[in-house]
Each structure stands twice: as C-alpha cells, then as structure tokens.
Amino acid sequence: MTTPDLHRQLEAMRPALLRFALLQLRNPELAEDAVQEALLAILEKPDQFAGASSLRTYVIGILKFKIIDCLRVAGRTVQIQTEPDQSEDDVIDHLFTTNGHTVEAPRNWGNPDAALEQRDFFRVLEVCLEKLPAQNARVFMMREWLDLDTEEICKELQLSSSNLWVILYRARLRLRECLDLNWFVAR
Amino acid sequence: MGIKPTCKEVHRLVSEQLDRDLSLVEKSRLRLHMLVCDACNNFSAQMTLIRRAMRQFPIDKDQP
C-alpha cells in the first residue's frame, strides 16, 4: 500500500475510531488525542502492519494501547466515584421480587451467532453503550473492550474487587435491558 | 444465603464468573439452580452474548 493510500484509509476510519475512544474516555479532548497519537504512530512506521491480518485490526490494537495510556494518565487526576448512589442499587433491586425471583423472566434471545452476524446489532449495542452512565461505561469498556483484567482495573481506578464486580454487573444489566428492548423485541 | 439459591443470587454469580473464579460452593449452587430455571439460563446466554459482542466489535469506515 502506498502512503497516500494508507493516509486515505486511516482518514476514513477516523470518525469510527473517535466514537470508540469517546465511549471509553468520555472526554472529547482525550479521545481526539488518543486517536491522533494512534494514527501518527501508524503513519510514522507504515511498514509495521505489513504482516498483520488487516489494517483495521492493526489500527484498533494501536488505538487500544493509546487509550490505556490515556486512562493511566487521567486516572491520576480524575477520581472515579466508588460509592454507588441510590439509583444504582435500583438497577439490581427492581429486577427481583423480595423473595429473589425475577419480576420479569429474561427471555430466550435465540441463536447468538445470528445476532453477531448483523451489523445493525452492533449499531444498537453502540447506542446502548452510549446510554450507560459515564462511570459505568468507562469501567465496562475497560473490562470488555480493552480486555483488561480485573486486578489491573482495580489498581488503575483504586476500586476494591467487590466494588468492581458490582459496577460490571450493573453495566451488564443495563445493556441487557437496552438490547432486549431495542433489538430483540423489535425483531 | 438461603438453602436454595435464588434467581437474584444466581444472576449476580453469572455476571461475576465473567470476572473471577467462583468458589466450589458458588459453582455448585449455580449449577443446581440452572438445572431448574429457564430464566437464569436465558440470562446466562445473554451475558455470554454481550461478552462475545464486545470482544468482536467491528469498527470500520462502513459504520455511520
């Protein structure tokens, strides 16, 4: 691939990369910086990805590294709220009756591969991620998108493990509900 | 913790097993409940789908 070609392809990917950086970082300036640094790193060494499976996979890999760097730096200045507020408890409690049964039983979502093959499914998922409260989303994306292990997240954010598990649980409950309403019901 | 695990306990364990190793007691409580509860089986499949989806999130220029 020639350099102008590479340039063009990276530019085309930029809006999508920026949306993802923003989902994770929740700060437009930090997100812009992370994407900029990732793209520069690639342009500086255009031969590096020659053997990689695809440019897209390569770019995402670099972007994730840059975002992890950003989170480390930001983590020192931005304290994450660790005490769940009342509305947070309700996310769990309103699903269950007092004797621990589900108020509304989760339904069968059908064949998972069918959902994962559809581009629109991921659009809905992205909207659902945008709707998560910022702190919830940040932690969830660290775990599930950046694929960081729980010990590392606890260290970066100075959270206890049990606190982290509850935050992740809440995020998953919210996403589940959002997907159920906006994807699986609408089918 | 009652003798019989509730959906509330099992939902939480389903989520937590994505983040930590459950104890033997927790595992057996989970398994016992799963034998008899469709709701929790569906919930567990949903959690697995969300994890898979996040791990293979496509990002490319074709998206809006």
Image: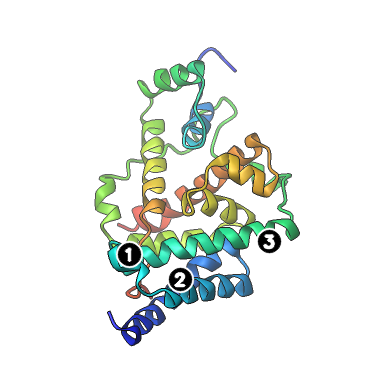
Residues indicated by labels 2 and 3 sit on the same polypeptide chain: yes
Report the residue marked by disc 3.
Answer: A74
Q: How many marks?
A: 3
Q: Check the image and report above or below for A176 versus A75.
A: above
Return the chain for callout 3.
A
**Quarter of the figure with the C terminus of chain B:** bottom left
Q: Position of residue B3 (x, y in %)?
A: 53, 12
Is B14 placed left or right of A161 in the picture? Answer: left
Give the Cα distance between marks 1 and 2: 18 Å
Residue A120's disc number: 1
Counting other residues with Cα less than 10 Å from the Cα at mark 3, is it few (<14), some (14-19), or many (20 or more)?
Answer: some
Q: Which mark is residue A17?
A: 2
Residue under the image location 58 percent in, 74 percent down: A33
* Displayed quadrant of residue A29: bottom right
Residue B56 is situated, as x and y percent measured from the top left of the image, at 35, 54
Q: Nearer the viewer, mark 1 or mark 2?
A: 2
Q: Earlier in the sequence, mark 1 or mark 2?
A: 2
Tell me what residue is drawn at x 36 percent, y 47 percent. Answer: B52
Residue type at mark 2?
A: Leu
Q: Residue type at mark 1?
A: Asp
Q: Nearer the viewer, residue B50 or B36?
A: B50
Q: Quadrant of the N terminus of chain B?
A: top right
Q: How is the image coloured?
A: rainbow
